[in-house]
Amino acid sequence: MHRPGFSLCICPDSRLLRDGLDALLASHSPQGNGGRGATSSTPGEGSAPSWQRVNFWADEGLPNAFWEHLTLQGLFAMPKAIILRNAHTLPADTLKRLSAVLISTASQGGSGLIWPLLCFEVLFEKGKAKVPVHIARLPFWQTAEQKGWIEEIPGLTGHDVSAYIRSAAARHGISPSPQELRRLSLALPPDAAFIHSELTKLALLADKNGRLPDNALDMTEHSRELSIFELMNIIQQNGDSPAAWRRILEYRLSGDNMVFACIAVLLREARSLWQILAGAQTYLPPQVAARKKTAARQLGFAGIARLWDIALMADKGIKTGERSTDQAFEMLAADLFRLFGRRRGM
């Protein structure tokens, strides 16, 4: 069976997306050259060929290497899966260019050595992905819909968490009792990356039969998640106060998704403050507008520009591997406290 000419993967959860990509790639072996030049998932003669993955991030801009990987194949080229994360953040003109290239790629009917996989990490609402209208109208999207090349993986909901924890626990070698499973379902948020992180810690405590010692689940208890918007309000309103830091330390990161969402909100906040300070018209509730106007005046144009630096440094640190998500978030929060605190004269 021929693989798709290209695939569109829609999922708001980084861990579920990764698992979905693994399953999709495993379901279609590379074709061409009789498997010659393909990498192998298991070393040794006779092992099945697998795709060489090449990853790009749309929010960093598409370098020339992306287009070269997408369009050029050498004589002894390896089968490549070109994975583009956060594809929904691409500018409109880039999407139009990419659409034309994908349509051309699709004409090969999945027989070539290049498999583009575009990841749209958008939320689902009432069971439907919130894909921007201008993207859904492009030819590549319509082609994918007609040919069934769209993979939709909704994020976890409160109803799915228990079943997912049971399955994930088995993968970690843990056999929770019904009572423990219920407690985990209530304690853990509906985020696959966070769930696996917590289960990894619990697996270190489990015995050889996967049973957990008494009170092991105490380490999974955490305060109500602090929303990103609450985080920004705390930093803007309280400066570098100990109480504010206590609230920040209570904030539990739930995988890459939450960190990148925090960065996105910070960039949006900086743009809004810049518009207010520049006198541009904004459409905000009066109470919100008044608070933002005060923050904009305190920061000034130089301080608002610093917000972009802080957000992009956190983003770069994670994507280059220089920092873990926890380290990037802690540095981001510390930089914000210093910025707002200094503007108050602290």
Image (cartoon, rainbow, N blue to C red):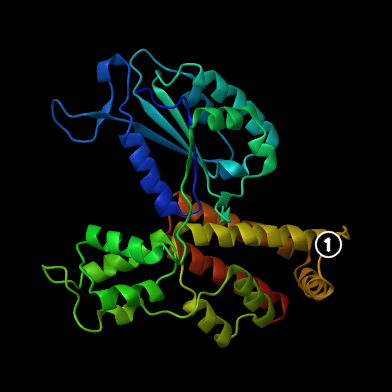
Q: Which quadrant of the structure image shows residue 322? A: bottom left
Q: Where is 196 relative to 108, above or below?
A: below
Residue furthest left in the image:
208
Q: Which quadrant of the structure image shows residue 279? A: bottom right
Residue plotted at (47% across, 63% down): 157
Count of marks, rendered view: 1
Is residue 35 at all visible to an observer of this figure?
yes
Is residue 305 at all visible to an observer of this figure?
no
Q: Position of residue 240 (x, y in %)?
A: 60, 81
Q: Position of residue 307 (x, y in %)?
A: 66, 62
Q: Where is 340 relative to 76, above or below?
A: below
Residue furthest top in the image:
75
Q: Nearer the viewer, residue 326 or 27?
A: 27
Considering the image in quadrants, where does the C terminus appear? bottom right
Considering the image in quadrants, where does the N terminus appear? top left
The residue carrying mark 1 is 283
Circle 1 — which element? loop
Residue plotted at (81% across, 76% down): 287
Residue type for callout 1: Tyr
User: In the shown orientation, is residue 245 left or right of residue 205?
Assistant: right
Q: Where is residue 116 in the image (x, y as percent from the top left)?
A: 47, 30
Residue plotted at (42% across, 17% down): 73
Crowd tier of the residue under label 1, counting other residues whose Cα lies within 10 Å: few below 14, some 14–19, many 20 or above: few
Q: Nearer the viewer, residue 321 or 42?
A: 42
User: In the shown orientation, is residue 343 left or right of residue 24?
Assistant: right
Q: Where is 106 relative to 55, above or below?
A: above
Q: Where is residue 95 in the image (x, y as percent from the top left)?
A: 63, 33
Q: Which of 219 and 269 is in front in this view?
A: 219
Q: Where is 331 relative to 22, above or below?
A: below
Residue furthest bottom in the image:
243
